[in-house]
């Protein structure tokens, strides 16, 4: 009968859906930096989406449960930067940034395929000496990347074509489905903004709100933009120093000092290693010098020491610059280059075109020459109109994702998107307390209209940190016959001592 046929068809449809949804079993776990229990699990995903029965990878997932008993049904999915950062390793930091949101919403962290424990594509861990050597010698860095690529391709999950942003977002949607969430909120930082925009493009029906900080859109060719944006941030540092009386007095003609230092390269320099403490001599090149300055531009707090570091380098002391460049984010280089070589490298300017291969472009061009490239759908580079509210945040002196990228994306997304600039901040502004409040109110607003009207005026009140002032040299101890030895700038005599002048008057 017709009703029986309908019931049978319905059960068949449900059975088919259940067979397609991979199981995600969560268990209680503890994570570094997190002061309370979380829920951890592994979702099996095909390495090659076209071969669901082929090689499987383990996608590691963490859910930080909402504190409230009556939690809201739309969790927050966080996308890390890089590309190549592990979202789960940032659990403590992200839990702190989203603390108020976490009261009523679960926070979901996924180690994107190729990062963390999800089919990791990590290169070797170089010693401090080797890491410095690679930073100062591009040929050495490229040779290490070539060795890494060969080693990674021998792994069971080492087909580097299947680590694109689009494939990773299909993983994200599989996690959403496995968790039973109909709609989710997206929080993306740096490369995570590209990941968020791709999820919004591919799965708009499952998106409630989007907050992206440090916007790197899919059509932004990262290696081409890298050097120009860093130069603009450095120029802003020089301009702001010249406009500040104390900085200008301490570091006169800072821009000219930098240009002179740059023009003097290449040349041999001797320095004490910031990690090993050993004295070394290397040939400093223009590109190595530029790479040493760049990390200090990411954060104005760190950047406050750049004028001093540049002046010191001009005087032959490179230790402050090297200390600024030491460390950095822990990323999976294999995943990083699998993404960039597939999505950005084919669109890079030609070697004979605008710009030069001295900076980031040259490094990526060489590294990507033999790197396997995954297929990227043409639609990936488009930014369609968004029905969901989108809040785009930028730092006005960001050296890698300045506001020009966010403003263009906001225009493409349409009237539901809003771009906010923190003029005196660098890369990523969510860490600023007032901006965390704005993000909370944006996600937590009951209606889309309320979300779009969130007050972000505090962005204009964030000052740039003052430039570092080196301590003044210690003054020599005054002689006993110095008539000025008891003034405010000199060591004082004991309170019961009588000044010589008064003795004479008596």
Image (spheres, helix red, strand yellow):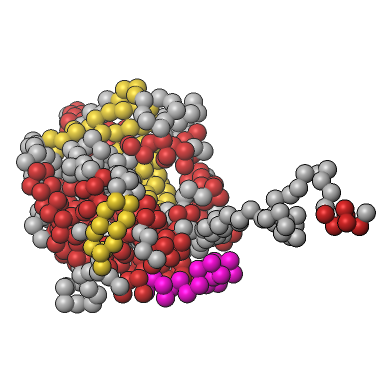
**Residue 448, image x, y percentages:** 49, 51
Q: Quadrant for residue 245, please give it.
A: bottom right
- For residue 52, say whether it is visible: no
Residue 490 sits above or below residue 316 on the image: above
In the image, 7: left or right of 372?
right
Name the residue rendered at 57%, 58% in the picture: 472
**Residue 115, image x, y percentages:** 24, 41
- Farthest right residue in view: 506
Q: Which residues are magenta?
A: 242-259
Name the residue rendered at 33%, 59% in the picture: 292
Residue 113 sits above or below residue 272 on the image: above
Magenta region includes residue 48: no
Name the residue rendered at 37%, 74% in the picture: 259
In what quadrant of the picture does the N terminus appear? Answer: top left
- Farthest top residue in view: 28
Is the magenta region chiefly helix, strand or loop?
helix
Q: Quadrant for residue 458, please give it.
A: bottom right
Q: Nearer the viewer, residue 115 or 481?
A: 481
In the image, 172: left or right of 145?
right
In the image, 373: left or right of 199?
left
Magenta region includes residue 246: yes
**Residue 411, image x, y percentages:** 40, 67
In the image, 390: left or right of 383?
right
Q: Nearer the viewer, residue 301 or 157?
A: 301
Residue 262 sits above or below residue 343 on the image: below
- For residue 366, say whether it is visible: yes
**Residue 342, image x, y percentages:** 16, 57
């Amino acid at each position: 009968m017709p009703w029986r046929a309908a019931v049978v068809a319905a059960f068949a449809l449900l059975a088919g859906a259940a067979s397609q949804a991979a199981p995600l079993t969560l268990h209680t776990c503890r994570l570094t930096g997190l002061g309370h229990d979380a829920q951890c699990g592994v979702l099996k995903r095909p390495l090659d989406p076209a071969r669901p029965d082929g090689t499987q990878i383990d996608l590691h997932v963490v859910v930080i449960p909402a504190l409230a008993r009556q939690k809201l049904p739309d969790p927050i999915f966080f996308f890390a930067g890089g590309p190549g950062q592990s979202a789960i390793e940032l659990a403590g930091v992200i839990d702190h940034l989203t603390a108020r949101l976490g009261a009523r919403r679960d926070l979901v962290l996924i180690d994107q395929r190729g990062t963390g424990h999800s089919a990791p594509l990590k290169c070797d861990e170089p010693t401090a000496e080797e890491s410095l050597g690679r930073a100062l010698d591009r040929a050495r860095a490229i040779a290490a990347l070539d060795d890494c690529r060969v080693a990674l391709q021998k792994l069971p999950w080492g087909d580097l074509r299947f680590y694109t942003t689009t494939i990773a977002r299909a993983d994200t949607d599989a996690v959403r489905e496995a968790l039973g969430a109909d709609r989710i909120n997206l929080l993306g930082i740096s490369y995570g903004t590209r990941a968020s925009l791709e999820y919004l493009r591919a799965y708009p029906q499952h998106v409630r709100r989007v907050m992206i900080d440090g916007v790197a859109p899919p059509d932004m060719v990262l290696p081409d933009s890298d050097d120009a944006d860093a130069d603009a941030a450095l120029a802003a540092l020089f301009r702001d120093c010249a406009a500040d009386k104390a900085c200008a007095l301490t570091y006169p003609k800072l821009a000219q000092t930098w240009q002179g230092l740059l023009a003097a390269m290449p040349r041999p320099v001797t320095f004490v290693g910031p990690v090993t403490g050993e004295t070394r001599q290397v040939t400093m090149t223009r590109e190595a010098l530029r790479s040493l300055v760049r990390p200090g531009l990411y954060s104005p707090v760190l950047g406050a020491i750049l004028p001093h570091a540049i002046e010191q380098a001009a005087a032959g002391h490179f230790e402050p610059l090297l200390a600024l460049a030491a460390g950095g984010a822990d990323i999976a280089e294999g995943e990083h280059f699998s993404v960039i070589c597939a999505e950005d490298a084919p669109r890079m300017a030609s070697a004979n075109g605008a710009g030069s291969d001295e900076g980031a472009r040259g490094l990526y061009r060489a590294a990507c020459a033999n790197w396997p490239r995954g297929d990227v759908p043409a639609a990936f580079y488009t930014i369609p109109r968004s029905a969901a509210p989108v809040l785009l945040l930028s730092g006005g002196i960001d050296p890698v994702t300045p506001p020009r990228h966010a403003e263009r994306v906001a225009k493409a997304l349409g009237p539901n998107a809003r771009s906010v600039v923190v003029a005196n901040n660098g890369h990523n502004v969510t860490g600023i307390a007032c901006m965390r409040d704005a993000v909370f109110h944006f996600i937590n607003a009951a209606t889309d209209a309320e979300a779009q009207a969130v007050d972000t005026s505090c962005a204009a009140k964030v000052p740039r940190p003052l430039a570092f002032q080196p301590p003044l040299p210690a003054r020599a101890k005054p002689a006993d016959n110095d008539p000025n030895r008891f003034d405010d700038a000199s060591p004082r005599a004991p309170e019961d001592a009588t000044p010589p002048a008064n003795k004479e008057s008596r």
